[in-house]
Image (cartoon, rainbow, N blue to C red):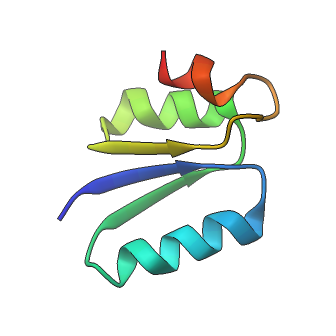
């Protein structure tokens, strides 16, 4: 089981990814913008981060850097 952080401003996108990952027994963390995603990533150290390219407050690429 992996800890996966999903960062997307679309609630529907996060919900869809969460359902797919939970069906495979992964723990899913969510954030709706890049700043919240960065804070969660620093606090929880997820195994995988899935981020949208365009996010409020920062880009997905900036978040991953």
Q: Position of residue 22 (x, y in %)?
A: 37, 78
Q: Position of residue 46 (x, y in %)?
A: 32, 42
Tally the marks: 0
Q: Is 23 situated left or right of 54 in this image?
A: left
Q: Is 21 situated left or right of 47 in this image?
A: right
Q: Is 52 situated left or right of 37 in this image?
A: right
| Front in this rendered view, residue 32 or 54 | 54
Residue at image location 28% in from the left, 79% down from the top: 24
Quarter occupied by residue 13? bottom right
Residue at image location 45% in from the left, 78% down from the top: 20
Q: Position of residue 4 (x, y in %)?
A: 37, 53
> Which residue, as the protein is rendered here, is positioned at the far right?
56
> Which residue, as the protein is rendered here, is positioned at the far bottom?
23
Residue at image location 69% in from the left, 35% down from the top: 53
The vertical placement of 11 against 63, above or below, is below
The N terminus is located in which quarter? bottom left
> Which residue, as the protein is rendered here, is positioned at the far left?
1
Q: Position of residue 19 (x, y in %)?
A: 49, 80
Quarter occupied by residue 42? top left
Residue at image location 50% in from the left, 71% down from the top: 18
The vertical placement of 59 against 21, above or below, is above
């Amino acid at each position: 089981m992996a800890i996966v952080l999903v960062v997307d401003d679309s609630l529907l996108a996060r919900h869809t990814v969460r359902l797919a990952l939970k069906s495979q027994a992964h723990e899913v963390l969510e954030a709706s913008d890049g700043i919240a995603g960065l804070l969660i990533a620093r606090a929880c150290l997820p195994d995988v981060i899935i981020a949208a390219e365009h996010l409020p407050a920062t880009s997905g690429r900036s978040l991953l850097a």
